[in-house]
Image: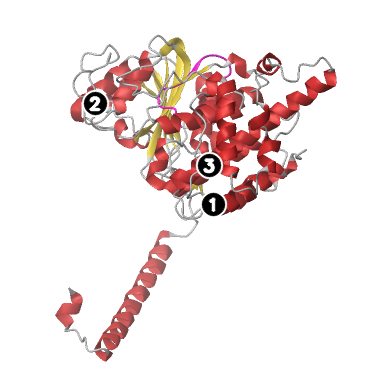
Amino acid sequence: MAKKSTADLGFEKKIWEAADALRGNMDASEYKHVILGLIFLKYISDKFEERYEVLRKEGEGFEEDRDAYSAENVFFVPADARWNVISDAAHLPEIGTVIDNAMRAIERENKSLKDILPKTFSRAELDKRRLGSVVDLFTNIEMIEHGADKDILGRTYEYCLAQFADQEGKRAGEFYTPSCIVRTLIEVLQPFEGRVYDPCCGSGGMFVQSAAFAKSRAGNIRDLPVYGQESNPTTRKMALMNLAIHGIDGDLGKHNADTFYNDLHPQLKADFILANPPFNLSDWNNGSLDDDKRWKYGLPPSGNANFAWLQHMIFHLAPNGKIGMVLANGSLSSQSGGEGEIRKRIVEDDLVEGIIAMPTQLFYTTGIPVSLWFLNRNKEQKGKTLFVDARDMGTMVTRKLREMTAEDIAKIAATFEAYNAGTLEDVKGYCAVVATEDIGKQDYILTPGRYVGVAPQEDDGEPFDEKMTRLTGELSEMFRRSHELEGEIRIRLETIGFGLKEAEFDD
């Protein structure tokens, strides 16, 4: 059995590094489905074997009874698809075919997985020797932590999703929202009980984190039914596997579909809506949606879907429902295409509970800054909106990627908690509670910096005259040094026959 400390010691990273040897010349977008498929196959096999042992010890002969597994939310794995069969074939030339056949057998026995699992392991470009080595790696590790709140495999799946997002760059936005963004939305909304909806669910990260939050509060994930939709068929399959790995019974509709043109949950009224829709999506409406009933606050411009997503979610919101979503910062202040008027009407309807300006470089897909919008049909603080400027938060974890720390997220969540309790005091440069009429005086622009102001600069104790003398002295030294460097550059250029006239250099 795997120990709890395994993951703490970097287990997920070790799995990734070992499995990464399988890739060879494959693109990350192809390799992704190989690794995630193997993780999923190992997961359901371990869960099946765990249940199988319980039934065997009970001695009632129900080991091969499918209902004995489905009753415990465990997938039934037929004999020819169990991990021992795959493990035995690890170093045979036909290992890829054995895995593909196992995937098909599992789909036949579990209708909810029909046409979901990857079946591309037998293709010629996949190195079978390396594939066998990864099978050996998984064989030697028990993926399930018995009795633990989280299983190792679930963490590994999430870790690998993040790694693929890093490798795929811009394409990653189709399936992955950085976990620190998701956790911030979750900690503010606190989805404990009720229907959760994501109209552009990607790989299902919002659902997984919602379930984790409910579990952390001693809740039952069965009290948090999830509904989602995804237009990309491959991404939808990843989401279904992700939900299955985390024991979440979600309704993602019967197929992939465009949320605007084919809403798969037309009657749904959700208690919590969490989403990271595509930023500034253009050409989303060919004109056939102009009279759609979802546009209560105004027809969004066809060149930008930001306010189409926002109004779609408001349409699906229950009477006491809440929304937490990610939008590009342009949505805070844009006046083009009627967006300013739409934003004004939403604010005047007292739906906007809070806005957070986030730091740059949080996303694998883009470096542009984003904001988090929180809407509530039944706000605790009527006629007021909380603005939080979190642009200086977060820590750079790589040269190009920033993450919000657990302390950052806890601070933001506590700020919203105090705001809803009516005890929050404005903090210059960080947060401010603003009345709707005052937002109106700012033309309904929702940029937090406009309301929170600038944090006061700490007095360093140095007298002004002394500071100016010191700074001008430092500037003079910099000028002197720049002239020295200019001379050195001239000499080096002349030695290779590229002498410059004074005017040419100054230009």
Q: Position of residue 234 (x, y in %)?
A: 43, 33
Q: Residue at x 74, y 24 (%)?
A: 51
| Residue on which disc 2 sits | 339
Mark 3: secondary structure: loop
Q: Amino acid at mark 3?
A: Phe
Observer-nearest of 83 and 369: 83
- On residue 358, the disc is none
Q: Amino acid at mark 1?
A: Asp
Mark 1: secondary structure: loop
Q: Amino acid at mark 2?
A: Glu
Observer-nearest of 359 and 58: 58
**Magenta residues, dominant SS class:** loop
> Marks 3 and 2, Cα distance to the nearest angstrom?
48 Å
Q: Which tag, 2 or 1, sits closer to the chain's start?
A: 1
> Would residue 8 be seen by someone viewing this image from the given angle?
yes
Instruction: Please determine whether, in this image, residue 463 is positioned above or below residue 204.
Output: below
Instruction: Please determine whether, in this image, residue 479 is positioned above or below residue 162.
Output: below
Please state the extent of the stretch shown in magenta in the rendering. Answer: 192-202
Numbered disc in front, either 3 or 2: 3
Which quarter of the rendered picture does the N terminus lie within?
A: top right
For the residues labelled 1 and 3, say whether their Cβ atoms are less than 8 Å apart: no
Q: Quadrant of residue 231?
A: top left
> Would residue 392 be seen by someone viewing this image from the given angle?
no
Mark 2: secondary structure: helix
**Number of disc labels:** 3
For disc 2, the neighbor class at 10 Å (few under 14, some 14 to 19, many from 20) is many
- On residue 121, the disc is 3
460 vs 3, left or right, is left
Q: Is residue 193 magenta?
A: yes
- On residue 127, the disc is 1
